[in-house]
């Protein structure tokens, strides 16, 4: 039971950390240099490279709970890895096929890029924290351009 709670806790916590780090990248010249390049190119690296960056950037936090409990540590690690995989996939999907983001009313990261929203829609995989912290900005995003794109499957995207 501890492991399941830690899995859920890590998943939610990772989404919160991702949200705040994305916001930080928009205000800090030092932290955000690589991120500004991402905005200029408006493309993701591929699911596996995104996943690698998320894991490398949070490896210490992924293992911290092992200091207190083996079962909790396993749950926390698996929850953090699950969120990293989901977020890497969602990030790539929003750059290549945003209509497939069925779990959100509006693909916030896609909109963040499309409309140059430097102060809104910081979520990558989820929009929860944008709602909580008042940075969610709804727009009519599904334009003729998106509707004209050929329908692709959930797996037709850049993996590496």
Image (cartoon, rainbow, N blue to C red):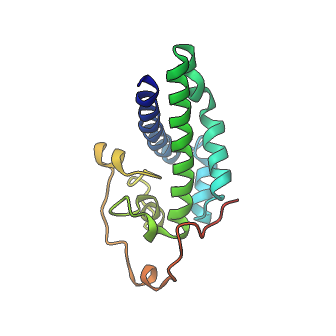
Kindly indicate the quadrant of the structure image that contains residue 77. top right
Q: Total of numbered circles in the picture?
A: 0
Indicate the quadrant containing the C terminus: top left, top right, bottom left or bottom right: bottom right
Would residue 101 appear left or right of 59 to someone viewing this image? left
Would residue 122 appear left or right of 46 to someone viewing this image? left
- Residue at left offset 36%, top offset 63%: 106
Q: Nearer the viewer, residue 160 or 45?
A: 160
Indicate the quadrant containing the N terminus: top left, top right, bottom left or bottom right: top left
Residue 59: image x %, image y %? 63, 31
* Residue found at the far right of this picture: 160
Q: Nearer the viewer, residue 40 or 89?
A: 89
Kindly indicate the quadrant of the structure image that contains residue 84. top right
Q: Nearer the viewer, residue 101 or 111?
A: 101
Residue 50: image x %, image y %? 63, 51
* Residue found at the far front of this picture: 1
Kindly indicate the quadrant of the structure image that contains residue 108. bottom left
Residue 64: image x %, image y %? 56, 21
Q: Is residue 130 above or below residue 96?
A: above
Would residue 100 appear left or right of 85 to someone viewing this image? left
- Residue at left offset 44%, top offset 79%: 146
Q: Is residue 105 above or below residue 150?
A: above
Q: Nearer the viewer, residue 83 or 107?
A: 83
- Residue at left offset 43%, top offset 23%: 2
Q: Is residue 50 above or below residue 62?
A: below
- Residue at left offset 31%, top offset 67%: 139
* Residue found at the far top of this picture: 68
Residue 38: image x %, image y %? 60, 58
């Amino acid at each position: 039971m501890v492991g399941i709670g830690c899995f859920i806790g890590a998943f939610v916590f990772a989404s919160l950390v991702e949200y705040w780090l994305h916001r930080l990248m928009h205000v800090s010249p030092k932290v955000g240099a690589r991120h500004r390049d991402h905005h200029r190119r408006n493309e993701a690296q591929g699911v596996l490279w995104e996943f690698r960056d998320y894991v490398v950037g949070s490896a210490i936090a992924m293992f911290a709970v092992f200091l207190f409990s083996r079962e909790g540590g396993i749950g926390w690690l698996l929850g953090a890895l699950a969120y990293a995989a989901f977020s890497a996939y969602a990030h790539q999907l929003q750059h290549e096929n945003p209509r497939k983001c069925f779990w959100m009313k509006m693909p916030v990261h896609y909109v963040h890029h499309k409309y140059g929203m430097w102060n809104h829609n910081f979520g990558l995989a989820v929009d929860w924290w944008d709602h909580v912290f008042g940075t969610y900005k709804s727009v009519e995003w599904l334009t003729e351009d998106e509707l004209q794109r050929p329908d692709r499957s959930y797996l037709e995207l850049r993996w590496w």
